[in-house]
Image (cartoon, rainbow, N blue to C red):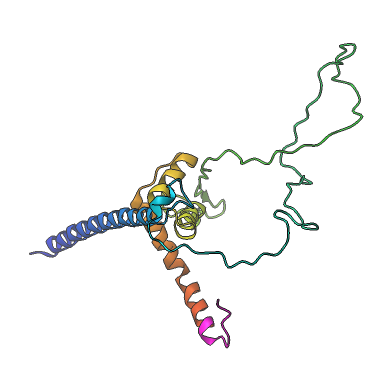
Amino acid sequence: MSQNERISAIEAENRQLRHALDVALAQNALLLERVQELEARLAKDSHNSGKPPASDGLARRTQSLRRRSGKKPGGQLGHRGETLRLVATPDVVEEQRPVACAHCQRPLEDGPVVLRERRQVHELPPLRLLVREQHAVHVRCPACHTVRVGTFPAEAPSRAQYGPRRRALVVYLVEQQLVPYGRARELLADLFGASLSLGTLVGWVRQGAATLEPVEAHIKTALVRAAVLHVL
């Protein structure tokens, strides 16, 4: 077998291995999602779902260890509430000006303003993916006529890709909020209108784990060296 034939055989074997790895990752994501759904189903009872109390079985009923404080339920006197307050610099200001006088029907477009009342609506902005295109500009030196090309940023290694914030959102949903891969995929498609494969989501989570591995190792080293661990 010639050297070119051996290289072609190795490349074909590598393609088969990559395909098998992609299939295995997708199957693993489906199994993880199924396990999370089954665990959530087992955790449901009459206290956190619409199931009747008779369906709880012989599970041990726990009692609260909190003692009566003698205080009335609800917010206590002097407790600072969480009332939504006006912000000093809103993003958008819309003026609601009356068109005509209610008494004599005279137009009020040039009438003097005697008072302004403020109300604010805190709302989510329209959700859509921001597509930022990068151009590597070829520039010819006017002195020696050498052409130099601008460098693409690290976030754009290929022709089209998703940015680091979108990848970080996927890792946050799956790892921090424990959202199953399938539901995270549906959520991103509903909010941003872009569908992602399960293999892509799994790959992003694995990439996030690899990126944070040095940080995790540093934290573990610091914990081992600590004289006292404040762990409950």
Q: Answer whether residue 226 is magenta in the image.
A: yes
Q: Which residues, given as a range, are shown in magenta?
A: 223-232
Residue 204, compared with residue 93, is above or below; it is below
Residue 200, compared with residue 7, is above or below; it is above
Measured from the top left, where is residue 102 in percent x and y?
86, 15
Nearer to the camera, 62 or 155: 62
Measured from the top left, where is residue 224 in percent x and y?
50, 85
Q: Image quadrant of residue 33? A: bottom left
Q: What is the count of numbered marks?
A: 0
Q: Main secondary structure of the magenta part?
A: loop
Instruction: Specify whether residue 161 is in view.
Output: no
Instruction: Specify whether residue 191 is in view.
Output: yes
Instruction: Name the image quarter holding the N terminus.
Output: bottom left
Q: Answer whether residue 174 is magenta in the image.
A: no
Residue at position x 72%, y 62% from top? 70
Residue at position x 37%, y 53% from top? 37
Measured from the top left, where is residue 166 in percent x and y?
49, 51
Residue 229, compared with residue 36, is above or below; it is below
Q: Image quadrant of residue 195? A: top left
Residue at position x 45%, y 51% from top? 46
Nearer to the camera, 143 or 22: 22
Residue 219, compared with residue 49, is above or below; it is below
Nearer to the camera, 134 or 104: 104
Q: Is residue 192 left or right of residue 36?
A: right
Q: Is residue 188 left or right of residue 78?
A: left
Measured from the top left, where is residue 69 in percent x and y?
70, 65
Nearer to the camera, 141 or 72: 72
Instruction: Name the image quarter holding the C terminus.
Output: bottom right
Q: Image quadrant of residue 64? A: bottom right
